[in-house]
Amino acid sequence: MTEASTQLPQSAPGHEWWRSAVIYQIYPRSFADASGDGIGDLAGITARLPHLAELGVDAIWLSPFYRSPQKDAGYDVSDYMDVDPLFGTLDDFDRMLAEAHERGLRVIVDLVPNHSSDQHEWFQAALAAGPGSPERARYIFREGKGPGGDEPPNNWQSVFGGPAWTRVADGEWYLHLFDSSQPDFDWNNPEVGDMFVEVLRFWLDRGVDGFRVDVAHGNAKAEGLPDIDEELIAAGSMDSPFFGQEHVHEIYRRWRTVLDEYEGDRVLCAEAWVSPLEKMARFVRPDEMHQAFNFVYLETPWDAAQLRSVIDESIRAFGEVGAPPTWVLSNHDTIRHRTRLALVPPPPHGAGIGPTSKSKADPTVSLRRGRAATALMLALPGSAYVYQGEELGLPEVTAIAPEQREDPTFHRTKGELWGRDGCRVPIPWESESPAYGFSATGETWLPQPPEWATLARDAQAGVEGSTLELYRRALALREAHGLGTGELEWIDVGPTAIGFRNGGITVIANIGHDAVDVPRGEILLSSSPLDAASLAADETVWVRTA
């Protein structure tokens, strides 16, 4: 055990912190750079923790900081039990963790069990050992089809574009659901499960409060690796032979027993892109994980009927297995919600945007709508996730030159999709400092747009009506009125608006164009300045009515 492993108080069963927590996602490369090399690091995170405590969040979640060749910004891990020098050292991690706990902030770290880097010692050993070897059995190697085995073993495609198989020198093919530098583990091999239990214990012993599990729905593949039904996937189905297989749950039942050995309400959160919500809720049954990201909510358009439906379904589906609903609008893999919810015309479901996209977002409408969406989300019972920079109202950045882009999606689609760089641009802290306070040297691994000066944290702190102050006030009110542990009661405010009560707070969100009446009472929060007693389009208000 390290000194950093001191835990925050444990809650009574049924009242665990994660049931109502607001968790702030940190993308380490883009949060704060203390070394001056233009890439964020652990020391930078430590220096900025006071700002997160002041914001009012309960915990932080860190995207990967492990040793990695950085082909996919750290999601290609070469050593799961060490810190990449790009981000610092294990001592830096321990200091950051201890400082976070000192400030009452819990720390969740990312874990990537579906695949490793091709530079991981296991994969290098697999390449050297050859076909049929125990080393190769830790990954998914197969012979090819067709004359000479020149065709991939099946028709699976990479999430990043292109084939999901790459051939090695001896003629076999290995599976990579993502980049070719990210070979998939074979979870049928017990060595893989044993290794990850060792990884869990390594970080739990250091004192982390839990894990966000990357591609939690992907570890298990259908027996025989059958071809995918391309028509089914084209129709928008989430079913596939490599995602959401039932035997994936066995993995997390084992992990849960490990976490239950530790004090301090340790938590597992699934990144599981599955639907419907009933299938997602299977990941958070009492003997599995504690939370699952509600991507169905994230993907719901700015539409009153659809939002009401997904909120109802989320509360019902998660409640049936005794888990809290979670709410999320943005993260490091999606277009920032300020921009996404205002794209006209809306892109096809699940589609990205690129140089030829017709979808555009008016900056005024997008900021107004993004703030309204946040005020709606933070009033819902359950746990909520906030992605770094959304508290500043940051939009998606599209003005990045091709030679500056790093996301494999951009390169594997030959530039047809911009990928995820636009939501990963280093965030601004100080309007008049080099790199807007991200790095003292002015270096940034992705270029920052000029508008970052007006959106910087110091330009918004203490400014009435700023997005930063909206978040601060919403989080303080959420805590003071127990909204995270409350119960939702719908009220009728017409077909193009959403209205509900949570405890003594009435929340109205106007999703349509026509003005909506504001109920009588004390106005506690409004996403935009109110015009008398009516709520204009793209506005949300919290009113104390009891």
Image: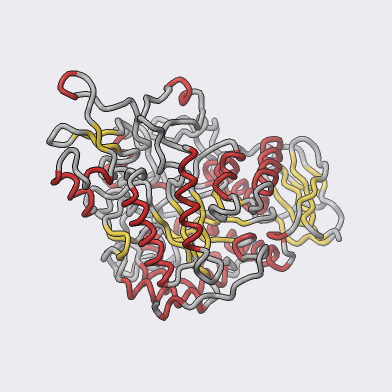
- Residue lying farthest bottom? 3
**Frontmost residue, 529 versus 281:** 281
Color theme of the render: secondary structure
Give the image location of residue 133, x and y in percent.
Answer: 19, 43
- Report the front residue among 452 and 66: 66
Q: Position of residue 14 (x, y in %)?
A: 67, 62
Quarter of the image with the C terminus is: bottom right
Q: Residue at horizontal 38%, vertical 50%?
A: 113
Based on the displayed image, in which of its 4 quarters is residue 307 positioned? top right
Q: Position of residue 121 (x, y in %)?
A: 21, 54
- Return the residue nearer the eye: 256 or 415: 256
Q: Residue at x 34, y 40 (%)?
A: 178
Q: Is residue 265 left or right of residue 109?
A: right
Against 235, is 413 above or below? below
Out of 71 and 457, give the one closest to the viewer. 71
Report whether 400 appears left or right of 376.
Answer: left
